[in-house]
Image (cartoon, coloured by chain):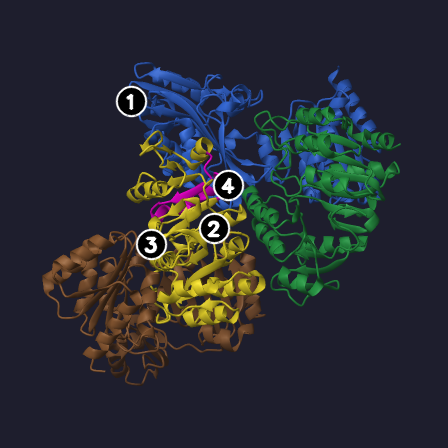
Chain colours: A blue, B brown, C green, D yellow
Amino acid sequence: MNLHEFQSKRILMEKGVNVPRGTVVYDALEALVAARNLKTDKIVLKAQAHSGGRGKAGGISVLSIDDDVKKVAERILQMTLVTNQTGPQGKPVSALLVEEAPRIDAELYLGVVLDRNHGEVTIMASPAGGMDIETIAREAPEKIFTVKVNPLRGLCPFQARALAYKLTDKNILANQIANAAKALYDIFVGYDCTLAEINPLVVSGETLLALDAKINLDDHALFRRPQMAALRDRSQEDPVELSARLAGLSYIRLEGDIGCMVNGAGLAMATLDLISIHGGSPANFLDVGGGASEQVVADAMNILLDDKRVKVVFINIFGGILRCDVLARGVIKAIKERGLELPVVARIEGTNIDLGRKLFADSGLPIQMMSSLDEAAQLVVAKAKELSGN
Amino acid sequence: MNLHEFQSKRILMEKGVNVPRGTVVYDALEALVAARNLKTDKIVLKAQAHSGGRGKAGGISVLSIDDDVKKVAERILQMTLVTNQTGPQGKPVSALLVEEAPRIDAELYLGVVLDRNHGEVTIMASPAGGMDIETIAREAPEKIFTVKVNPLRGLCPFQARALAYKLTDKNILANQIANAAKALYDIFVGYDCTLAEINPLVVSGETLLALDAKINLDDHALFRRPQMAALRDRSQEDPVELSARLAGLSYIRLEGDIGCMVNGAGLAMATLDLISIHGGSPANFLDVGGGASEQVVADAMNILLDDKRVKVVFINIFGGILRCDVLARGVIKAIKERGLELPVVARIEGTNIDLGRKLFADSGLPIQMMSSLDEAAQLVVAKAKELSGN
Amino acid sequence: MAILVNRESRIICQGITGRNGTFHSLACRDYGSNLVGGVTPGKKGAFVDGIPVFNTVEEAVQETGANVSLIFIPAAHAKDPILEAVDAGIEVIVCITEGIPPLDTASALFTVKEKGRVLVGPNTPGIISPAEKCKVGIMPGYIHSPGPVGVISRSGTLTYEVVDQLTKAGMGQSTCLGLGGDPVVGLSFVDCLRLFRDDPNTEAVVLIGEIGGSAEEQAADFIKAEFQKPVIAYVAGRLAPPGKRMGHAGAIISGGSGTAQGKIKALKDVGVEVVENLTKVGQVVREVLK
Amino acid sequence: MAILVNRESRIICQGITGRNGTFHSLACRDYGSNLVGGVTPGKKGAFVDGIPVFNTVEEAVQETGANVSLIFIPAAHAKDPILEAVDAGIEVIVCITEGIPPLDTASALFTVKEKGRVLVGPNTPGIISPAEKCKVGIMPGYIHSPGPVGVISRSGTLTYEVVDQLTKAGMGQSTCLGLGGDPVVGLSFVDCLRLFRDDPNTEAVVLIGEIGGSAEEQAADFIKAEFQKPVIAYVAGRLAPPGKRMGHAGAIISGGSGTAQGKIKALKDVGVEVVENLTKVGQVVREVLK
């Protein structure tokens, strides 16, 4: 789960990190009032949406207080931001952050992630802030400094200090960088983040300011961070992904026309790859999971059948915990309730396979059963091509 | 620094451990009111003083509500408790705890200390509560169960649970024991204790109650536990030890007549031992410390000279950080300000020894300088015997 | 022979009285595994179809000599039983639980490594050594058969798919393991390759990777440096969009790293036979082993 | 030869710009120690009488190749510099600071031991190896002389007293160490005895104990099992009343354990020459060494 910039900045402020003065607003008039209240010359309007690249997409505007703030605010608030991270459908703008635009003497980077290989929390810092960390890693890897923190010992003051002194020789800045690193570490661990990042962390005179911030939370730990879970902005989620999640399914929207239902994340990914090898294009990733009930399977089927883009449905199940008879009952249930206007190809295998096949056969539904996975995939791709007239 | 029973119990309550209902009072009438308010038949009055063995010394009284509570309360509040832990001068009773006397089905022991050898926090539990842990260790060591906690990892739920199941098979009790162990561990670590103990922890029906509790805090960590430091009851400290501590000295009252001033804890202990070998009896342990100033030395000298029991003063200094000239100036300063009615024997050695000797010589004070430590000790003992007429 | 678990393994199940714990403990025993006990605090003295239940792992180990544990404990509380198993001396800990907060896993893993134990998972289907009739996990036992192929995977059903192909193509397995689909897991591809290298009954290894992290790249480095047996690999997720968790918490491409393309290249570069079409894995393994 | 520190030791002082840090760093250098640098955050580029100051231990180690550190940091903050020294690769850490909260020391010690480093103290006068002209501590250097006697002690001035006797009696010292007067300290009597056992230049050891803890009893066990050189011991505190801290936080008899009598008996039982009169230690050592 991701937080908005303004939410992330509030958390940073609570932990003692300075951020530019500002207000979050939801309409253009409010934006104007907020801008005037800042009593400063140069202000910035920032679209609040879960995506990087907001600037390039037109979601960030630096203005003089004499400019038509209201008009620009209106424009941004009505945008659907399309960036290289959002996909073509874009993200709505949930709110607008109105901030003073501070003087910028230098831009630093500070971020915290979990090192998957060693299970250590890694704090990264760079004097080359402003660009994203992957770009720095590619273009100037020698400008990234890291500290690995043993999760049992926690971040020691000397580690934060040593990192800070790699970015600056000035004690007044080093202390602030060390404090910001400590704050970011505490946020990362205290709220179970997947990412806590300040980029850029700007030097503005003798003060350090978090000009932009990104805090992403781990969904698997939200149960113990209820105050964070309450910050979820559902308007930023794909509605189908959202309803799938609420049904206990793992669904990701893709750009093709073949609806896929698979059990297990790995097999689901492999199924997409197989469709692609044969020249097809999947409309989604959909893992019904190991413990799916008949109803969950039916929900999954409905999600695929509701998707106007889907031309053909491909069911690929290797029953382990999920029994093939449960799968069959769920699929049949969904179709019986709504009718079927699309071709469905099913390849099922594993636990209770005979019973599952029999249920499909007895249902009288026009579901094409295949025993070879490869042939099934080829068939699905061929049907999709045929139906789209390619 | 030690806490009173009622203070310890309040902390336990805050951490979710049940204690008997009760009130702390400071006079007999209050005690009577408190006893009646308990609306129970059997009550107990407990002297609040920093010592074990209060029961044997008459500081604890179990009464029926129909007994003359006021009279007993009055008696206890006026006591000076003399136990095997207080020394002959005893401890005043600071307050009275008036509690219900619960039904007792079993008495357990639960305590937390720091294992000096491994730097691990050790939780000890025993089904043989009521007697002190040393007695259990001597008489039934197989009845003591321990868990060692790595300070970085902290106490894991399974460790508390495993300890609890060693004391009982009943889940309802095991859960409460595990919770009490967790609470006691959190108190120990959270307040930097040297000891956190519930003894006995009584089983009263299906409830566990901390019938008595002892929390001792580490003086070296009080700086970061101001809310604990505020609980200090100075009436429980020896007035001389208290004023020595405030002067930055380490002083312990002993029962003899030779006043000792030494630098360094080890040398100070060794000096006492040496006096004893030669048949003498020291009045105190007094370490002026390595960084003592002239004033601190003067303060130390005054403490010895103020002590009516002291017949002769023995100064034994091996100057390292503490220079002999500083020592000499401090001693001379104190004596010049108040005069000298006692013999003083000094053996000084180490840094700036010549200057120190010269200062003493030039002072014209009747201080007997010795160069052999052994002979100095013998002389001191002989003088003390002579003056006490033995 | 096999790696990590075999007919000598003495297995307990932590959480044995829960629905999944009971079901899979019995399924493991049915397969032939030596299920010697179970642990559920407060249930000491009970039996699950004849398997004795203890309050603590310490007791279970004392009474049964257990050295392997299978964990079914809800994610919110799964860190504690892992540490309990370590402290009680369990050597191989198989944690089926999915969705443990990664910081919990990371912190438990620190103790696991310090004490030199093996944690398989979390979020793993487990381990199975067919010739040893030993299954410690939730995989369908019947698709496996004894033989010379070691299988290591980050995925559950995808592994079953591959194992099914192998068995149907007449190639049995020495040991099959799931490393787990979480971002932080205990045993790694490299750890497993080291074990398979030293296992005389393993002649080839199938490595099933997926997007996210760099476990496959590290495996490639290890293979180059010190692994001589043939390795056949499949890597899932070439179509995965960046920034999206593909079902597994660990299957996520972040900031351009962890892509299937990168992993495939790394493996190919060290001579691993990378199969692009999942349905051909069995066939390729047969050709390699011929 | 000597143990732990010698003429090759490259020493830094953490807290070198403080009053005590400066005074004792220079005193160590005057004695002959190889003081290569100091650390005070924010003072990089400064010099203390020619000794360069760095912001971090990491930098100091990189620039000077330091392997020994002498710590003078106020007790409230002393845990951090110990860990900093460990992480930067310092092998021998001598922590002079008195009064560190014992839980802080315990927690730092865990990392020290995990990484296989040596922590002397806290609350120690330090280490000195006279023949090596190496002093890392606050003891008065001039009372020491080179020779065959190793001295280990839990006390400062008491050690000076003994060393003074030894020197005046013509018996120099190989290395003298203070273990520290705190309840939890790094190096133990046993650790030192092991080092002295393997040091060819040490012919006998003087062990100076005191009440509290069980370090002397453990030393006795070790001596019995694997220490052949003569040991002469003195144990302070026979008159100490139970429950009172005798100056040192660690010198406390609790619940009847840690008494001088118990320690003396343990040492005598394994053949250690225990001297009861402090002023006779030098004389007894001379007789033993004859």
In magenta segment, residue D71: yes
Q: Chain of mark 4?
A: A
Q: Which residue is mark 1?
A: A36
Label 1 neighbourhood size at 10 Å, few (<14), some (14-19), many (20+)?
A: some
Type of amino acid under label 4: Asp
Q: CA distance from mark 1 to mark 3?
A: 46 Å
Q: Spatial distance from mark 3 to mark 4, Cα to Cα?
A: 28 Å
Q: Position of residue A302 (x, y in %)?
A: 67, 34
Residue that badge 4 annotates: A192
The residue under label 3 is B225
Chain letter for mark 1? A
In the depicted view, which residue is nearer to us: A336 or C147?
A: C147
Q: Nearer the viewer, residue B379 or C19?
A: B379
Tell me, yes or no, whether dots 1 and 2 are on the same chain.
no
The question of residue A65 being in magenta is answered with no
State the CA–CA distance, disc 1 to disc 2: 56 Å
Instruction: Name the mark nearer the viewer: 1 or 4.
Output: 4
